[in-house]
Image: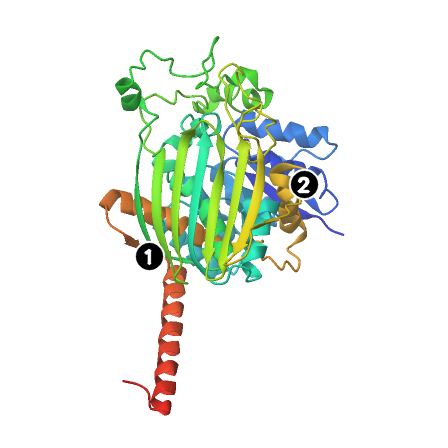
């Protein structure tokens, strides 16, 4: 059997999941033949990892040579793990050069670039797969199953609250994510995961978004107002405090960023209370869906614990999922070995708020009951392994419809993009006005179906002689 030839585009921290899959479980079917990365230290980190596993060294190219790389290395598929605002041009260039694409979320960060991706897909007929690993987490799959089985009837509303703690949440304010022009803010970069879950859970698409929020905790102005002054510009120094990240304390972060910054000037450990932060840390949205359901969503990025609560109301009852991924961040623990407790088990915090998950269903006039959640091995409760199987082996017959393509990516970022526009204007934003044909077609199809249903109802009423 011939190997499918892969190229990695963007060699940061997230890329390791894909590299390890190619040189590990999927080595019989896949080969990493090239790496496209402007920083030579980061590129070499993954070259060395591939060689250490006993495979030929992948060729290294710069971003300007993406098309040459695809042609010369006969690349079948590129895996894009680059900065969010670079996704769209890299996707379009890869498709036009003749390769399919696997891309990390978010698909892109604004309406015009999403439209450009749609045009490229139409033009080339090639495939774009987006990796929404949260769908594969057993707890989220269990909630989808409950809703899909009709246990709580037709969904009328969703209440969704997500909190990021002062280890994980703070990390978005150290990196390039802190600049909205590069990440789209947390509404796009982080919350696209959450909006995809809602879209997928209730099997609908967003129609209208109203948002409120601001930078209220991190940043220089907030620090000054609370009397926080004279902080180091970065966290890599002796006696770093709980809000700082010392890259020397993590071998992988040191290799990928501290040892590499001389080549591009990218500083991975900037002060969360420094200047130049343009994203929000407190956000709230109301989202109307084409199905008629409404989402009430909130995100806080400076919580003392991490996790989420979601309640789904239906015509027959209610389902409630509560997840505590880390019960506390303690002042004396130093650099926590796990920055993101949603991806890897962070261990017990010894908190009164225990880590765990619970899915409760209660139908009208009945007692509540708990739905079992069965986790597997690895990240996201075994979800990462399931995701990778779909990416590298191709999606099989999944009754929960977890594999996602570019359309799901568009629907997820549409909420965040519309939310950002609402933050700017103070007004609700119609998703169909974002300039993306696919979303406009979504709305038109639902409107046409509603009009047809109304016409049918009127005709039946006329026939029965009961119409007013």
- Residue 365, visible in the rendered structure: yes
Q: Quadrant of residue 213?
A: top left
Q: Where is residue 80 in the image (x, y as percent from the top left)?
A: 53, 42
User: Is residue 419 shown left or right of residue 140?
Assistant: left
Q: Residues within 10 Å of mark 2 (few under 14, many from 20)?
A: many
| Foreground of the two, 350 or 7 | 350
What residue is rendered at 47% in x and 14% in y?
236
- Residue 70, visible in the rendered structure: no
Vertical side of 284 occupied by 157: above or below = below
Under circle 2, the secondary element is helix
To which residue does mark 1 refer?
435
Q: Quadrant of residue 83?
A: top left
Q: Where is residue 161 in the image (x, y as percent from the top left)?
A: 43, 41
What residue is rendered at 36% in x and 62% in y?
440
Vertical side of 306 occupied by 158: above or below = below
Q: Position of residue 437 (x, y in %)?
A: 38, 61
To which residue does mark 2 refer?
22
User: Is residue 308 shown left or right of residue 112?
Assistant: right
In contact (CB < 8 Å): disc 1 and disc 2: no
């Amino acid at each position: 059997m011939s190997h499918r030839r892969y190229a990695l585009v963007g060699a940061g921290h997230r890329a390791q999941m894909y590299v390890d899959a190619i040189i590990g479980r999927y080595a019989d079917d896949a080969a990493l033949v090239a790496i496209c990365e402007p920083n030579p230290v980061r590129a070499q980190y993954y070259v060395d990892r591939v060689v250490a596993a006993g495979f030929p060294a992948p060729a290294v190219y710069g971003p300007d040579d993406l098309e040459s790389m695809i042609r010369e290395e006969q690349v079948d598929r590129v895996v894009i793990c680059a900065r969010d605002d670079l996704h769209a041009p890299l996707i379009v260039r890869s498709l036009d050069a003749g390769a399919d694409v696997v891309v990390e979320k978010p698909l892109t960060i604004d309406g015009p670039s999403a439209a450009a991706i749609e045009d490229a897909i139409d033009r080339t007929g090639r495939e774009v797969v987006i990796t929404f690993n949260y769908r594969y987490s057993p707890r989220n799959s269990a909630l989808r199953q409950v809703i899909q089985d009709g246990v709580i009837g037709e969904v009328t509303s969703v209440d969704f609250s997500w909190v990021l703690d002062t280890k994980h949440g703070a990390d978005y304010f150290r990196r390039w994510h802190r600049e909205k022009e590069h990440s789209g803010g947390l509404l796009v970069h982080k919350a696209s995961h959450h909006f995809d879950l809602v879209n997928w859970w209730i099997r609908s698409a967003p129609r209208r978004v109203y948002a409120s929020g601001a930078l209220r905790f991190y940043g220089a102005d907030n620090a000054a107002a609370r009397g926080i002054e004279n902080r180091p510009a970065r966290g890599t120094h002796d006696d770093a405090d709980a809000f700082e990240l010392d890259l020397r304390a993590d071998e992988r972060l040191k290799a990928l960023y501290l040892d590499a910054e001389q080549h591009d000037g990218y500083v991975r450990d900037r002060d969360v209370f420094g200047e130049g932060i343009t994203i929000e840390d407190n956000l709230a949205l109301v989202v109307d869906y084409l199905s008629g359901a409404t989402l009430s969503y909130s995100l806080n990025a400076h919580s003392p614990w991490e996790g989420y609560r979601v309640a789904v109301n239906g015509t027959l009852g209610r389902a409630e999922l509560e997840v505590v991924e880390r019960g506390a961040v303690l002042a004396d623990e130093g650099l926590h070995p796990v920055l993101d407790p949603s991806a890897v088990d962070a261990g017990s915090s010894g908190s009164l708020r225990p880590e765990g998950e619970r899915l409760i269903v209660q139908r009208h006039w009945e007692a509540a009951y708990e739905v079992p959640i069965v986790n597997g091995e690895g990240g996201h409760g075994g979800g990462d392994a399931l995701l990778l199987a779909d990416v590298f082996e191709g999606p099989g017959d999944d009754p929960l419809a977890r594999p996602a393509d570019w359309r799901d990516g568009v629907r997820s970022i549409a909420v965040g993009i519309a939310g950002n526009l609402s933050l700017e204007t103070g007004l609700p934003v119609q998703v169909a006005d974002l300039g993306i044909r696919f979303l406009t077609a979504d709305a038109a199809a639902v409107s046409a179906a509603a009009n047809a249903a109304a016409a049918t109802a009127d005709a039946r009423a006329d026939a029965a002689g009961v119409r007013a």
